[in-house]
Image (spheres, rainbow, N blue to C red):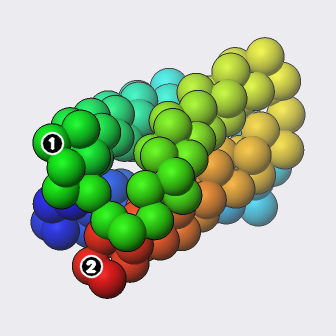
Amino acid sequence: MITWLSYAVIGVAVVAAIWGAVSAVRGRPPGNAQFYWAFLVELAVIVQSVVGFVSIGRGHGPAETATSIGYLAGIVVLMPAAIWWGISDRSRYSGLVMTIAGVAIAVMSLRLLELWSV
């Protein structure tokens, strides 16, 4: 796992989580700029997962390979689900869903970094 890439994913996911919390507190649904940022988060997550799967395929994976594969596959579906929710439900709670997805992505990326560094 590339350390700087993991920290980049964590950073953009935290920004997405904060942005979602701010929009939820303000009582507004996520706007277009927030969805564009969520797409950026998803792009970073996809790159991270591809790098992780390639590393595992080449035999350079962590000791807990099954757990890492689960995280790498699961992390990819979080933000698209939040984006879909945000587009289909234009209420303040869709910002909260974006927050939850951002926090989950940040935590899962941190856990992947932990698994890889052991």
What residue sits 67% from the left and 34% below the top? 82
Instruction: Locate residue 72, reporting x and y percent.
Output: 45, 45
Residue 6, by quadrant, is: bottom left
Specify the label residue 31 is tagged with.
none
Label drawn at residue 58: 1
Disc 2 packing (10 Å; few <14; some 14–19; many ≥20)? few
Q: Is residue 12 left or right of residue 90?
A: left
| Residue at point 45%, 65% (across, down) | 64
Query: Residue 74: where, in percent of width, then height?
Result: 58, 41
Residue that numbered label 2 is attached to? 117
Q: Position of residue 107 (x, y in %)?
A: 53, 68
Residue type beneath disc 1: Arg
Q: Position of residue 12 (x, y in %)?
A: 35, 55
Query: Which amino acid type is marked by label 2?
Result: Ser
Q: Secondary structure at mark 1?
A: loop
For the point 47% across and 71% down, the residue is 111
SS of the residue under disc 2: helix
Do the residues bearing badges 2 and 1 touch, measured as CB atoms within 8 Å? no
- Decide which of tag 2 and tag 1 comes sooner along the chain: 1
Crowd rating for badge 1 (residues with CA inside 10 Å; few <14, some 14–19, many 20+): few
Q: Nearer the viewer, residue 6 or 56?
A: 56
Q: Is residue 6 visible?
A: yes
Q: Quadrant of the C terminus?
A: bottom left
Tell me: 86 left or right of 114. Answer: right
- As drawn, the residue found furthest toward the top would be 88
Q: For the residues marked 2 and 1, what is the alpha-carbon distance in whole angstroms?
A: 17 Å
Q: Is residue 11 visible?
A: no
- Numbered marks: total: 2
| Residue toward you, 17 or 91 | 17
Work out whether 34 lies above or below 26: above
Q: From the viewer's side, name the closer residue of 32 and 40.
A: 40
